[in-house]
């Protein structure tokens, strides 16, 4: 193992230890990483109407159960600059970048932040500097709430980073999302598509990988510790593509919305 | 002793923006402000000139309105001829509360209605834009999440250009 303090002058360390009669201990590693984790289902103002989630197709969704099961989380090595891009010369698949967004060759409009996340997702396959095992769950999340999740592994003192270098990505596996609810129609009278009592539904998704870029370096000129606050943010628009009146494609529509809309919010602090 | 120091960005949202700004500047060495502080009119002009371009034929009524939900796109709209004038309906889905501006390449009459058919009054309208000579009509609406129909009337049946997008943030009245 590389020792952070060894190259700084073992003579001084040995001299001090000899004078005080202490027994030499192993030095610090190049880095220590620890993490806290939470799941948030906090739509922006105007998205929740009388306790129900408003959708782009004029439905109001009452979410009675929203459960999330989690897989592993990792801090992945990689040069953060490799995840960046020049709007004047965007990466393959993106074009016409201006005013904070680009267009994709498959017809989407994506913000610079989304592109960084998409590139981060591609970078999530690198080697892990540190890994965590969140409590699997299922974690029950209420609409408008944020719930902490216990994390085993590098939660307390932290995981040692054995080699100097840079982190580029935080990645997390969402193993399964289970939703039970009832959809109501915001349209009334002759415009209504659902009965007044609404329509009960259940959604189950497959596994979803989420990643976010993070610039952090470990080495002789860096502070030892990195404390991460990671929040899995559920997108407010997870039902936007669902036409409840047709009753078709519910699992697929919500699964796609979560796959493209789940975000990792990151808060990072360095410590000695 | 374990002294902790918050990194530059204290919240998740600010961290994201900061990280992305760092990424963009690191990779491209470009002036971030130059690419993010474009006026709405200048943004619309870019799309009128460069697209992406989609052709669409407006519906005859709200029930058959053609879907024009893609923002930051130049829609080339074919209107039906009604007594020598152009007329038709488009539909859009809004996924974020806030101001949304609709730019046209010539003067039009626009009536916006929500999913229940109620008319939405524009916050502002104009027949030109200081940052885009192509604009002949512009309307800004504060819209909630939902589906809306646009009834369009024009003195001509020529192809009508439309670019629209949301402000993407909070605003002040």
Image (cartoon, rainbow, N blue to C red):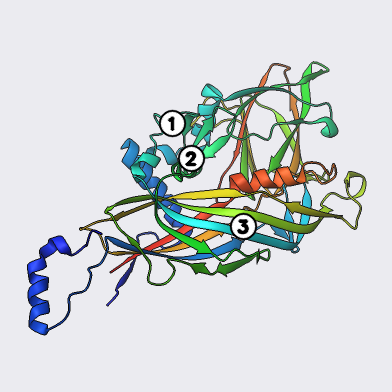
- Marks 2/1: CA distance? 9 Å
Callouts 2 and 3 on one subunit? yes
**Lateral position of residue A223 relative to residue A34, left or right:** left
Tell me the mark number nearer the camera, choosing from 2 and 3: 2
Q: Pick the quarter of the image with the N terminus of chain A.
A: bottom left
Looking at the image, tell me whether mark 2 or mark 3 is earlier in sequence order.
3
Query: In this view of the protein, can residue A170 be seen by the observer?
Result: yes
- The residue lying at 77 percent from left, 56 percent from top is A61
- Marks 2/3: CA distance? 22 Å
* Chain ID, mark 3: A
Q: Secondary structure at mark 3?
A: loop
Residue linked to disc 3: A44
Callouts 2 and 1 on one subunit? yes
Residue linked to disc 2: A115
- The residue lying at 56 percent from left, 35 percent from top is A109
Looking at the image, tell me whether mark 2 or mark 1 is earlier in sequence order.
1
Q: Are marks 2 and 1 in contact (CB under 8 Å)?
A: yes
Residue linked to disc 1: A91
At label 3, counting other C-alpha atoms closer than 10 Å, the crowd grade (few under 14, some 14-19, many 20 or more) is: few
Up the image or down, A30 lies above or below A191; here it is: below
Residue B62 x %, y %: 82, 34
Tell me the mark number nearer the camera, choosing from 3 and 1: 1
* Chain ID, mark 2: A
Q: Pick the quarter of the image with the C terminus of chain A.
A: bottom left
At label 2, counting other C-alpha atoms closer than 10 Å, the crowd grade (few under 14, some 14-19, many 20 or more) is: many
């Amino acid at each position: 193992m590389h020792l952070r303090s060894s190259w700084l002058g073992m003579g001084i360390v040995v001299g001090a230890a000899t004078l005080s009669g202490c027994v030499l201990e192993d030095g610090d590693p190049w880095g220590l990483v620890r993490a806290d984790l939470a799941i948030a289902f906090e739509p922006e103002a105007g998205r929740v109407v009388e306790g129900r989630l408003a959708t782009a197709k004029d439905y109001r969704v009452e979410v009675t159960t929203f459960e999330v099961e989690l897989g592993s989380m990792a801090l992945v090595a990689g040069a953060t600059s490799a995840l960046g891009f020049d709007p004047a010369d965007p990466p393959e698949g993106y074009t016409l970048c201006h005013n904070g967004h680009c267009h994709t060759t498959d017809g989407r409009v994506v913000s610079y932040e989304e592109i960084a996340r998409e590139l981060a997702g591609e970078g999530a396959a690198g080697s892990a500097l540190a890994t965590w095992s969140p409590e699997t769950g299922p974690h029950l999340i209420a609409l408008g709430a944020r719930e902490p999740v216990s994390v085993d592994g590098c939660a307390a003192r932290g995981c040692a980073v054995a080699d100097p270098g840079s982190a580029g990505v935080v990645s997390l596996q969402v193993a399964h999302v289970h939703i039970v609810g009832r959809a109501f129609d915001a349209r009334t009278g002759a415009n209504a598509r659902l009965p007044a009592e609404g329509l009960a539904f259940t959604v189950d998704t497959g596994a979803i990988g989420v990643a976010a870029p993070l610039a952090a370096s470990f080495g002789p000129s860096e502070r030892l510790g990195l404390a991460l606050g990671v929040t899995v943010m559920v997108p407010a628009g997870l039902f936007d593509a669902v036409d409840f009146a047709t009753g078709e494609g519910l699992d697929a529509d919500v699964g796609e919305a979560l796959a493209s809309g789940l975000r990792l919010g990151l808060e990072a602090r360095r410590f000695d | 002793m374990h002294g902790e120091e918050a990194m530059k960005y204290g919240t998740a949202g600010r961290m994201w923006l900061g990280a992305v700004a760092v990424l963009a500047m690191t990779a491209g060495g470009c002036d971030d402000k130059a690419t993010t502080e474009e006026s709405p009119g200048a943004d619309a002009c870019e799309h009128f000139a460069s697209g992406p371009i989609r052709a669409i034929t407006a519906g005859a009524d709200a029930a058959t309105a053609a879907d024009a939900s893609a923002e930051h796109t130049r829609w080339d709209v074919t209107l039906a001829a009604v007594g020598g004038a152009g007329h038709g309906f488009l539909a859009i889905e809004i996924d974020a509360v806030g101001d949304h501006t609709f730019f046209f390449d010539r003067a039009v009459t626009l009536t916006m209605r929500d999913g229940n058919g109620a008319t939405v009054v524009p916050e502002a309208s104009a027949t030109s834009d200081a940052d885009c000579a192509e604009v002949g009509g512009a309307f800004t609406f504060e819209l909630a999440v939902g589906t809306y129909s646009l009834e369009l009337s024009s003195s001509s049946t020529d192809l009508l250009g439309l670019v629209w997008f949301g402000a993407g943030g909070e605003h002040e009245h």
